[in-house]
Amino acid sequence: MQSLPVGLQTEFSYLFLFIKIFFTLLSIFILFFGYRFTRIANGFFLTILGYFLVKAFNISNYFLQMVGVLIILSIIMIIYLLIPRFFTALLMLIASMVIYSVSIYFGGDIKINWVVMIILSIISVLIGIIFIRYSIILYSSFISALLLIVQWENLRKAYIYVLISMIGIIVQSLSYSFNFKLFRGYELNYRERRLRLIKDLRNTILVAAIAIFIFFIILVIFSPRIKPLNYYYLNKLNRIKQDGIFNKPSLIIGSEYNYYLYGRAVPISFIAKNRTIFNRIKVIIIGKDIRRDLIKYRVIKDNYEIEKIKKACEITSEAMQEAGKMIRIGINESDIEKKIIEVFKNNGVKSIAFKSIIASGENALLPHYDKNNAELRAGFVVVDIGCMIDGYSSDMTRTFPVNRKYSKGQLELMKLVLKVKQLMVDKLKPGISLRKLNGEAKDLFQEAGFGKYYIHALSHHVGINVHDPNEDILKEGMIITIEPGIYIPEDMSVNKEYWDIGIRIEDTYLITKTGAEQLTNYSQIPFLDSGG
């Protein structure tokens, strides 16, 4: 059976297509010619880095964001022109973190191996210091390959990332070898170029400023104004307008934010009181990114949103029940996934909240495993699923014994995870801190001797995104998950009967005035308690 699309489906947009094609062509250019056009490659990467650093400081005004990016670019370019080996070492360090992050992502794990990361960082820095030109070849290939797979969902596979990176490295290395004499002279004349620091810096920043300004002008001029899909969204917009959020013209970037406001998943839109071209130009100076302001509205669900999420949770619970019936030795993870998709489709589901996780045996140790192609043989199988109803998500996880019976060690750990989960659920109510609850869950696992095997957060918000924007202090109307889990590989310093066990139990909850309402329902310990 054909699978369902994942997540909110973004509407087609010529502007967004133009942006994707532009960045795709630029990424391909740098992938093949990064070593020859170092200013373009470095300026591109540093602009992106500068943007994320500016965002980390919560700067929302667009003009200040652009100024901040240029300041960061100037500082790092000065370092590059004065101490090129330090600069290449820095970018190699960033590239190594990218590679390591990508490997964790594609591996389905979320736990950082600090020893591996430190060794990789040291090697990368040494390469950056000793081999300047080859460092440029390496990091331009790795980072441009990452930008390509981020932009095109169909490319998001480990082997494709490795293949694209290797093509870039090989092409640039061969080209560099053929032009070695040219670049040898280039390296020898580097001291002369260093004397022209001010001129080089001025030209680089000027080009970057013009490029950023033109790109932003294109966004401002061509971003569409969107009309609300129906009266529900019109009333929502009017309610938010009363708080002054839209007093200044702004761009709404992100299909999930536009869907929240208008009921249409467009990637970018323009919002202002008046439609004049002058109002659009004003965005550059006085406009601000209002997504952070919208989070306080998104985290509190109204009755319409609650009903949609409840429906998604009901269907997900039904799918989990059907998945439980299939659990047995010899069946493939993919067969269980197909059954879940079948239940979703039979209930009118058009898309799933995320790629289903059917993780058996050793795969259960990987919280984000989603290959779903192994045969069930022994141990546990973790089933983590969710669907979407009219753009709103559900999330639910259960852990099943493959042979439908629990060993003593398996049952002990299941009861421990369930105990922690229930204690945390009992504390849910307005005013409670999720961060504090997570710490308490960690302490409970620590007291039981399994603290270091609790490797992910206890909770996340659920809404248009299955991982909706986070708000620490709970309020009535929020919808969250509670999902404690422990993951114990082989050869750990615990009893052998606990080895190779991954467990996660997750449900979605609506925060009420006095507590929480559980929205997903299925046996907490399948095949054992009465709900199984």
Image (spheres, rainbow, N blue to C red):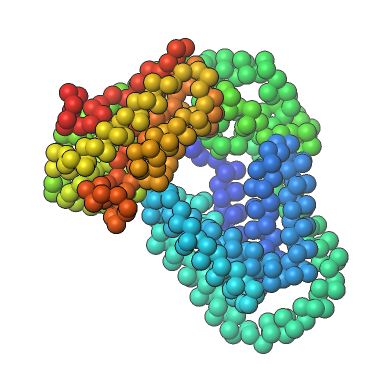
As drawn, 525 above or below 157: above
When asked about the image quadrant of residue 46, the answer is: bottom right
* Horizontal and vertical percent position of residue 24: 56, 56
Please identify the quadrant where the N terminus is shown: top left
As drawn, 167 above or below 106: below
Q: Is residue 66 left or right of residue 366?
A: right
Q: Measuring 16% from the left and 50% from the top, which residue is drawn there?
A: 377
Res 4 visible: no
Tally of numbered tags? 0
**Nearer the observer, 371 or 163:** 371
Res 191 visible: yes
Q: Measuring 39% from the left and 21% from the top, which residue is drawn there?
A: 426
Q: Measuring 74% from the left and 33% from the top, which residue is drawn there?
A: 287
Kindly give the residue lying farthest to the top in the view shown: 513
Q: Is residue 496 left or right of residue 487?
A: left
**Nearer the observer, 192 or 269:** 192
Please identify the quadrant where the C terminus is shown: top left
**Nearer the observer, 303 or 348:** 303
As drawn, 20 above or below 5: below
When asked about the image quadrant of residue 320, the answer is: top left
* Horizontal and vertical percent position of residue 301: 49, 20
Kindly give the residue lying farthest to the bottom in the view shown: 181
* Horizontal and vertical percent position of residue 315: 29, 26
Q: Is residue 283 left or right of residue 6?
A: right
As drawn, 144 above or below 59: below
Q: Measuring 63% from the left and 85% from the top, which residue is drawn there?
A: 180
